[in-house]
Amino acid sequence: MLILGVESSCDETGLALYDSDAGLLAHALHSQVAMHQEYGGVVPELASRDHIRRVIPLAREVLAQAGRELNALDAVAFTEGPGLAGALLVGAAFAKSLAFALGVPAVGIHHLEGHLLSPLLSKRPPAFPFVALLVSGGHTQLMRVTGVGNYELLGETQDDAAGEAFDKTAKLLGLDYPGGPAVSKLAESGRPGRFKLPRPMIGSNDLEFSFSGLKTAVMLLARSQPGDAATHADIARAFQDAVVDVLVAKCMSALQRTSLERLVVAGGVGANRQLRAGLDAAAARQGFEVFYPELELCTDNGAMIAFAAALRWKGGLPKPDTTFSVRPRWELSLAG
Amino acid sequence: MTQPAPRLPLASEAATLALGAALAKGALPGRVLFLSGDLGAGKTTLVRGFLRALGWTGRVKSPTYALVELYALSGLNLYHFDFYRFKDREEWVSSGFREHFNPESLCIVEWPEMAEGLLSPPDLHVTLEISEPGRRASFLAHSHAGREWRSAALASLLRS
């Protein structure tokens, strides 16, 4: 079964081809395509969320990479939600139109389902059941996953996502927005312990998160200190220590509460090295196993959408139909 | 005509929440509220107080990443926008958000500066400044409705 996956829920446009026998054949993000060539000019910055311009060149790109023809597709999978309505509509309209032209089904996939199943695409896939931590610029939540389509929300952020706190800390430390990876890099040269920042909700006795207050604490600390490079590195370190401590503590608590033994980490912040080291160490001490997607599949991508569709429709694809909708707000637990 | 902006000290997060709740007294469809202030000034906290006062018991997430969060309240669609991530003010045009600014919806906009010159003036523009250990709010009304809104909110705070 050959599936084209289309992700367009937020900033990234991602396309991919997944074959249920041969595995992932190709995937591409908008930044990997020479847009200049396709359009004969510079794409203006205002098109940064303009998925319309990207989706067809990317589809051609992945077909060419895989050496496959359009008419070999068995289905087109697209992100149905949650996300920005206008952005979702581009992917949905493209997927449905292409599928209609080819006479194959187009299937809608939950964005977060794509993320949390993505570690199953890695060389060392986890077995069900597991606890999943989804941690990115837009999401921070813990789920209990007992199988494909069986997701139970255990806890999530009350305000800012962890990745958003990283991006805003970057701005407060004079780095560009979004600067999550730049904060992590800066933190590596920072001295641990010079500053101590709060660990929000670490003792809340539940699996909820809050990162808005931590951002404010970084702002107040940065205002009270000299703006030299070493101080900024020490603040970045204090910030990252706080986020990692909270995420590690909540993940271990989720494993204990659910009596599960495997943890899956997905989303852009899951690429953070200190977080991975912290989770690996805590898990090893307590006898748990941790699984991550391949680094290139941590951020939004089309591969996870095609892959989730292949798992969902393993037993046979639905009949093609021409109606479609998007769901800008959509709880993952309702996607089963 | 706009009037000078009154200033209100906010000693704590609770005071910011209370200001949000006071502003919710003027939550009518068609109204637009702008919220300005640096990162960590309490803009989303104010919106949380606003929504809680209208009976919303669910989460009030920062809209920074998603750009907009919709709250379907009884008799009112409340759109909570955040234009922080706009790299170019023209993104306001390509976003298609303009259609949500209509007589049936209440719109609250964080970081309206990122679409400066393209947005119509709001009814009321609240600015939060950091004034350690707390914050300070100022209020600029741009319409008759905005002046009413501000007076009602400030009167409600004085009573409580």
Image (cartoon, helix red, strand yellow):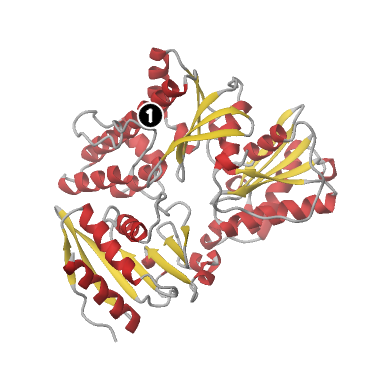
Residue A326, placed above or below residue A255? below
Quarter location, residue A225: top left
Figure check: A104 above or below B20? above
Q: Amino acid at mark 1?
A: Lys
User: Which residue appears at 20% of the width and 44% of the height?
Assistant: A221
Seen at 67% across and 34% down, the residue is A307
In this rendering, position of residue A325 left or right of residue A45 = right
Label 1: chain? A
The outermost residue toward the bottom is B1
Where disc 1 sits, the SS reads helix
Depth check: give the residue in front, B45 or A168: B45
Residue at the image position 25 percent from the left and 44 percent from the top: A218
Residue underneath mark 1:
A250
Residue A275 position in % (x across, y down): 39, 28
Specify the quadrant that holds the C terminus of chain A.
top right
Q: In the figure, B145 relative to A14: above or below?
A: below
- For disc 1, the neighbor class at 10 Å (few under 14, some 14 to 19, many from 20) is many
Q: Residue at x 41, y 39 (%)?
A: A181
Q: Residue A178's spot in the image, x, y percent?
A: 41, 48
Q: Is residue A36 visible?
A: no
A230 to the left or right of A144: left
Q: Nearer the viewer, residue A277 or A289?
A: A289
Residue A138 position, x and y percent, is 46, 46
Residue A229 % position (x, y): 24, 41
